[in-house]
Amino acid sequence: MNQSKQNRMAMMEFEKNKRKKLQRIYERKNCIENLPNEIFYEIFDYLEGCLLYEAFSNLNYRFQQLLIDSSVRLKINFVSYSGLLLEHRSKHIVIPKRHQIISFNFDNAFGESPIFTWFPINSQFNRLESITLRDIRTFHKIFHL
């Protein structure tokens, strides 16, 4: 009886260790955080800047550090957003991240919103490569800033 109990205990221990080992292998294969930074930079390059920042900035420490890295290039699209959302994104994403922004895309969806007064586009946007203005009906407001 004692021998069979020892055999059962040994078998249970063996199964427990086997499950742990398989779980570690499974976690290593399926954990997105195990991907190298370069892959995340490639993924980030396909995402709109504000959405990227909102999705990944508070996820964990690693993603916060990735977003701080100056090699992350942000493409900002201000298309069909409400005035409050535009203001929030201007103050909390565009202004703090202006050194990482490479492009802006604006359309008339923001209407009479004073978007260009929230962040004047100046030399602090040192990586800015392009500005696209689509369906802007109030050009005089832009040029009078």
Image (cartoon, rainbow, N blue to C red):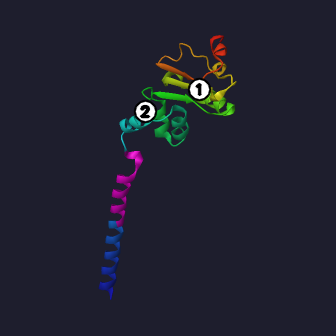
**Which residue is at a point 42% across and 27% down the rendered structure image?**
71
**Which residue is at a point 40% across and 50% down the rendered structure image?**
31
Judged left or right of residue 38, residue 82 is right
Q: Quadrant of residue 39?
A: top left
Does 105 sit above or below residue 35? Answer: above
**Which residue is at a point 41% across and 47% down the rendered structure image?**
32
State the residue lying farthest toward the bottom. Answer: 1
For mark 1, what is the residue? Answer: 107
| Quarter of the picture holding the C terminus | top right
Query: Over which residues does the magenta segment extend?
Result: 19-34
Residue 19 placed where, x, y %?
Answer: 35, 66
- Crowd around label 2: few <14 · some 14–19 · many ≥20 (10 Å): some
Magenta residues: mostly which secondary structure? Answer: helix
Does 48 sit above or below residue 96? Answer: below
Judged left or right of residue 111, residue 22 is left
| Quarter of the picture holding the N terminus | bottom left
Q: Give, as a three-letter code, the residue at label 2.
A: Asp
Find residue 45 and name its label. Answer: 2
Find out whether residue 33 is within the magenta segment.
Answer: yes
Find out whether residue 53 is within the magenta segment.
Answer: no
Does 2 sit above or below residue 15? Answer: below
